[in-house]
Image (cartoon, rainbow, N blue to C red):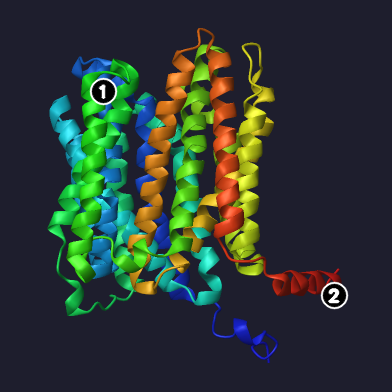
Amino acid sequence: MADKALPDKQRGETLGKAEMLGLAAMAVGVFIVANDFTALSVAIPAIEKDFGIDLTTAQWVINGYAMVFGVLIVTGGRLADMFGRRRIFFIGALVFAVASTLGGFAPNVWVLLAARFVMGIGGAMMWPAILGMTYGLLPDGKKGLAGGTIMGAAGFGNAVGPLIGGTLTDTLSWRGIFFLNLPIAVFGIFVTWRVVAADRVGAGERKIDYGGIAVLSAGLIALLLALDEGTDIGWLDVRIIGLFVVAALALVGFALVEHRAGEHALVPRDVLDNREFAAAALATLLMSALFFAALLYLPQFMMKRLDYSAIEAGAGLLPMMGVFAVTSFIAGPLYNRLGPKIVVTAGAAALAAGMFLLSRIAETSPFTELIPGMAVLGVGVGLFYSSITTAGISALDKSRSSLAGAIIYMAQIAGGSIGLGLNTAIVVSNPVLADGISIAFFVDGCLAIGGLLVVLFFVGGRIDGERLEEMVHYHRAHG
């Protein structure tokens, strides 16, 4: 009787125990990858002290992981679609866990850096495989829940990363951050093995585009190195210009290599030619400067102007990161009810509004003045990233879901890197920290307006009036 009361399009789309356990396993996998981006940020001073190194070397504990992850994630997505997402997830999680253990036992900084680079490889295999498996677990009517689950877990991992890292560093050692990854990874592998069925892939999809991987990796390494080092040695330095030239040539070469590779290309033509997917990637690129800039410069302001400790600054981000995590989980049901256009647009608008609010920051601003802007920004991040990921993946065939998710995330990393370079150039050129942050955040808000226009015109189709009308009638009937 209960089943007959459900609308036709909802029948057969309720989630069973296996699906819920599978979602939990995917969330755990995302958590350890996302947590690793932020947990070590507060442990850098302890690592410097233990190994007797300077900040320039120590920062590669974070930068090296992020760079390898960003460079290889598209390759990881393609491999997951070709050889099976479950299989690639197992391999990536094993690599991540073993490298984490080696990092925890590292006798010197060079072993630690090597372990972090290998962890980046494991993470680049895990993330797109998780995305593909999550969307594969759910029926079509619940796709929004997939994006919400992934980005909610990512937001939670990012939010508690500094708190976990700070607690372990102060009470045990920074090495505990690495050892914590092992039991979490084992749990994720075990649950996935029990509840997620192996996906079937055709034999014709197994030819690897080594040329595309090599050229794209070279271009991305050159681009990310230029963006990372440009603020330190100057944007007009011949080495930075040379890296940008190499990046441009490699990316042009990548297009030529992919054309010749045909159906075996790292990024197949049906992906490149899909306008809605391209628009989703472009909107993500434009919006990602905001989130990365806020993550870097809000703690800088808290520590240098409000005299917060590293742990206090990490906790100070909770109005943004906590709202981000909660909103990500809410975004899934909203996406299913309202469709992509409304939710993605609302997220983009909140991102712009949040940055304009934060751009009012001044040298004398107390922490309480930052809370409204951080909260609005958190709403925007939670609505936008989960929904734009779902919209981008849904624009392509299901067989491309891991690759699509990887490209969307690559756009997020590239946008964040470009945005950080732009923000840093603005901030360091101003003698007053808060004034530099204010100008940079205003520029970020203008970029968000550009992303909002892309979303309005090119992402998510038209507003689904029928769904809106159904919701209005439903709430009136149950009011």
Dot 1: what SS?
helix
First in sequence, mark 2 or 1: give its number: 1
- Please, which residue is most extreme toward the top here? 431
Which label was assigned to residue 80? none
Residue 173: horizontal and vertical position, in percent? 30, 27
Q: Quadrant of the C terminus?
A: bottom right
Q: Residue at x 39, y 47 (%)?
A: 411
For the residue pair 430 and 291, the one nearer the viewer reads as 430
Taking the spot 26% from the left edge, 62% from the top edge, the residue there is 78
Vertical comparison of 16 with 379: above or below: below
Residue to which mark 1 is pinned: 58
Residue at left offset 26%, top offset 23%: 58
Q: Which residue is mark 2?
A: 477
Q: Position of residue 201 (x, y in %)?
A: 24, 77
Q: Is residue 199 left or right of residue 435?
A: left
Q: Which quadrant of the figure has residue 231?
A: top left
Q: In this rendered view, identify the residue nearer to me: 179 or 93.
A: 93
On the image, the x and y values in percent for residue 312 come to 52, 23
Question: Helix, strand or loop at disc 2?
Answer: helix
Above or below, comparing residue 188 to residue 105 in the picture: below
Mark 2–mark 1 distance (CA, rounded to whole Å): 60 Å
Q: Is 443 placed left or right of 136 in the picture?
A: right
- Residue 149, placed above or below residue 368: below
**Residue at image coords 50%, 7%:** 431
- Amino acid at circle 1: Ala
- Regarding residue 140, the answer to whether it shows in the image is yes
**Label 2 crowding class (10 Å Cα cut-off): few <14, some 14-19, many 20+?**
few
Residue 171 visible in image:
no
Residue 263 appears at what percent x and percent y? 23, 71
The amino acid pointed to by label 2 is Ala
